[in-house]
Amino acid sequence: MLNISLQHKMMMKLSPQQVQYLKMLQLPTLALEQKIKAELEMNPLLEEGYDEELESATEQEEEGKEDPIEEPVAEKKEEQSAEEEEEKYSIEDYMNDDLHGYKAREPFDNEEKDELPIPDSVSMSHRLLEQFSLLDLDDEEILIGQEIIGNVDEDGYLRRDLPIIVQDLNLTHGTTISVEKGEQVLKKIQHMDPVGIASRSLQECLLVQLEVATMEPGIKAIATRLLTEFYDDFTMRHFEELSKKLGITMEELKAVIEIIQHLNPKPGEGEFSAHENYVVPDFIVTKTETDFLISLNDRNIPPLRINKAYKELMSKRKKNGVSTEAKDFIRQRFEAAKWFISSIHQRRETMLKVMRTIVEKQREFFETGEGLRPMIYKDIAEVISMDISTISRVVNSKYVQTDYGVFSLRHFFSDSISTADGDEVSNKEVKKKLKTLIDAEDALHPLSDHKLAELLNAQGLNIARRTVAKYREAMLIPVARLRRKLI
């Protein structure tokens, strides 16, 4: 039996336009450019360009003229006939609708499009295959060599087990390649340029490079023995034990370790394109004589307008060849184009509000490059009366160019650490002090986390040893034992 009941629920739903705005808000500059290009391709009513009618309509609004889109159209709807309904929303309504003051900055065609030339580059695998093709090999060796090169990762290591590679090749091609033959081919690849490529471990990579290195035979023999027999002691920095086991002095051990440290631990490192290694700042903050000039880096974002060619289609009757379905489609595209332009403007205004507030909160940093203050998203949200989630979307994947370098917006947000005086400092400033202490430590006797905590507390910072360990790990600094060096 069915039961009927009443329930009261508090729910908040976002309109499609709000969802679109929030999605665009979290896009960085380059992603926004791609989004605009995609929208221009999908919506025939949206186009690039400077619109004089839009400019004129906005000036009329400023003079006090009534905007037709702001009329209470909902009440008029019931009083109008079907034909009047068709004429109610015309192209002018959308062209003049500038509720948010969106105006093109200047003609896009006149903007400079200077770009840095991107050098042509050849991938690591392509270079290896070129070298491999010059070797005197049979068909099976060529087959397994190509498969090995195809499995080399970005650091230059072969992470896939060689027996599995050989087994897959035998099953796929019906061959009978042995693992021993695979090892022989792998050895030839490892001696190509860069030496050590396709190694299966750091130990193997260093040993291969030692084989081809030109140096005094006695030192090479000691270094090879160190990496072969006492590799664990080497990685654990047990220098005194290594000296005893190898039967050499500490000075001789230092010379051997220096040779090993000059070998390349990542033969494939550095294989990236200019696009992958280039950060495009979303904001530019420049210090003037009296204040800061804050701007969006949107020179490549084109001004948008609605295509005027559809104006006649909106005014034509069905008898002239324009169906009601076509007009409905055009109206839908009008709405989409209008909201897309509005979302871009809203994104611009919100981002500038957030950036202005960040600059005000971190004024000392933007003036001197130091003195970062503790700040969380809530601090910004309260000033500009927006939700914390909105601030998070603005900060996400955004960068700002300052007089002291390019920083992620997340760089300006941090928790606080209390001082002995009762003040608060940013944990990023604490990390900076921690790194200064580590950089100045005795290389032979590095500071432990407990000692570092004591030194920071002596500087007036209330910080525990476990917090020091947490910050040290966040900065990818190893423990004291692994920081030990021979001097």
Image: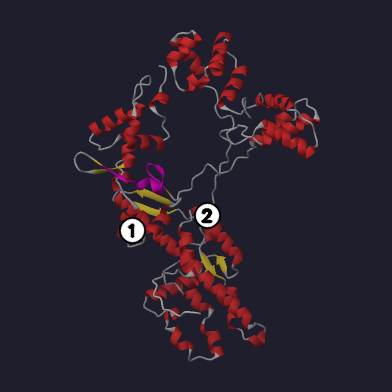
Specify whether residue 104 is in view: no
* Camera-nearest label, 1 or 2: 1
Query: Is 349 left or right of 324, judged from the image as shown?
Result: left
Figure label count: 2
State whether residue 139 is above or below residue 112.
above
> Circle 2 — which element?
helix
Residue 59: quarter of image: bottom left
Name which residue lies at 38% across and 19% down.
444
Q: Earlier in the sequence, mark 1 or mark 2?
A: 2
Sort mark 1 into few (<14), some (14-19) or many (20+) by Cα contacts within 10 Å: some
Q: Which residues are magenta?
A: 400-417
Q: Where does the C terminus fall, quadrant-wise?
A: top left
Q: Is 411 contained in the magenta span?
A: yes
Where residue 460 appears, as percent x and y from the top left, is: 22, 35
> Circle 1 — which element?
helix
Name which residue lies at 45% across and 84% down.
74
Q: What's under tag 2, amino acid-wise?
A: Ala
Specify whether residue 234 is in view: yes
Mark 2 — residue? Answer: 31
Name which residue lies at 47% across and 55% down.
298
Q: What's under tag 1, amino acid-wise?
A: Ala
Name which residue lies at 58% across and 80% down.
314
Mark 1 — residue? Answer: 381
Query: Is 459 left or right of 206, judged from the image as shown?
Result: left
Q: Is 179 contained in the magenta span?
A: no
Where residue 398 appears, as percent x and y from the top left, is: 44, 51
State whether residue 337 is above or below residue 250.
below
